Amino acid sequence: MQEGVLISDIVIANVLASACLILIIYLLDVNEKEPPWILVRVYLLSILATFLFGKLKGFLFGHFEWEFPVWFHHYVVAGGFEELLKFLVVMIFVWPLKSFDDETDGIIYYLLAAAGFAVMENVGYSFHFVINPYRFGLATGELRPYHAALRDIVLLRAVSGHIFINVVSGFLLGLARTRRRLWLLPVLLIVSAVLHGLWNQAASTGWLHWFALGLLLLDVFLFMLSLRMSFYFKFMKRLRFRIGELIIAARAAKIDPDTVMLLRGIHRNVRVLRRMQAPALKTAAMRITRLLPARVDAVPLNGEDGLLSVLVKVNGILGRELERTGWRFWVGFFLTFSVSGFFLLMILMNFV
């Protein structure tokens, strides 16, 4: 009877923790939400891959009497193999997606893979509850140690560990994808394995709370940085597309050839906007990045006013788009620190 209650409690705790985590991850994607069916697919595939990995790991390390030093188990058996599994799931099922187009998406997808892995890992932990009931005070009827252990495993060790570690992994994945820096992929795998090993080592030495707190602060910084980078990247991408349209419109309007040549240079590298010397283009850049009006009366297509008129006619980036971007950024800021505060509270509760 007690074992049945124990299993049901663990299953309910796992389901609730997983559901809340998925909802939080979905809400954190404030820039451009991914299709929900893709998120669910990544999550379920991660659970399936973790189940198969558990069978393989049990066969390799359960049927053979191999003795490893503690550091090897922390950094290679647990850290290396588990992070390699999540990395393969993300690379096979997420990397080819067209919806994966900014740094924040890398964090979102990697967190979903980590959430699926954590749920299956908690199911594995549940067997230890059932096999060792006396360890948690069930034989004496005292359930307080059991609830403390359940909270420690579901919220602090398994779920929080994978989430805290894989925010860094997702940030590196997003950089590798959007900036085409493929050399970051092996760096990602090594960093993930090292952080996982450090997490396990900190858990065994009593320094887990401080390590988790430091990693949490790093995660908050990286997530906010990824939001800002993704906003800037998509803004510049839209701007580059609009300038491409502007080149066509400028040719049709017979704007002077020097201006067209400068526009071509901007089209090749939008960052030239910051170093622009031509008064007309400099003014246009300032108007675009601040408040470009939705409509401007028709003016002769010459000089500075003519260039601004062409920008409006080809639907340049409007000021209200940038205002909406700022609003989304602050929503992400609020949600990130709310989630961080929740996990920080759970960490501090373990000091009491």
Image: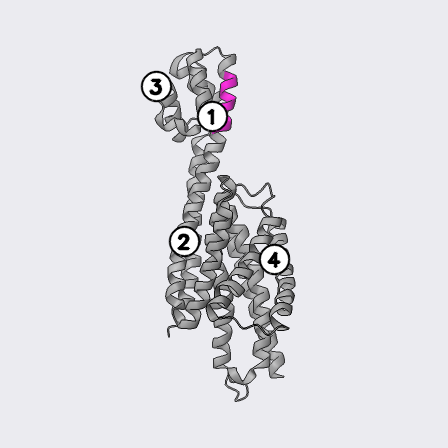
Residue type at mark 2 is: Val
The reply to whether residue 31 is in sight is no
Q: Nearer the viewer, mark 1 or mark 3?
A: 1
Left or right, 12 with respect to 291, comes to: right
The 10 Å Cα crowd at callout 1, few under 14, some 14 to 19, many 20 or more, is few
Q: Within 10 Å of the Cα at label 2, are there few (<14), some (14-19), or many (20+) other Cα atoms? A: some
**How far apart are labels 4 and 3 at the CA level?**
54 Å
Q: Are marks 2 and 1 in contact (CB under 8 Å)?
A: no
Could you tell me how far apart the alpha carbons at marks 2 and 4 are, in whole angstroms?
A: 24 Å
Tell me residue 169's x, y (percent).
48, 52
Residue 268, numbered circle: 1
Residue depicted at x 42% and y 57%: 338
The residues colored magenta run 240-249
- Mark found first going from the N terminus, 4 or 1: 4
Pick whichever of labels 3 and 2 is earlier in the sequence.
2
Q: Mark 2 points at which residue?
A: 220
Main SS of the magenta segment? helix
Q: Which mark is residue 258?
A: none
Q: Can residue 43 be seen in this snapshot? A: yes
Q: What element carries label 4?
A: helix
Task: Please state if 123 lies on the left or on the right of 187 as rendered.
Answer: right
Q: Which of marks 2 and 4 is in front?
A: 4
Q: How many neighbours does mark 3 have within 10 angstroms: few (below 14), some (14-19), or many (20 or more)?
A: few
Question: In terms of image quadrants, where is residue 228?
Answer: top left
Residue ID for mark 4: 46
Instruction: Return the residue at label 3.
Output: 279
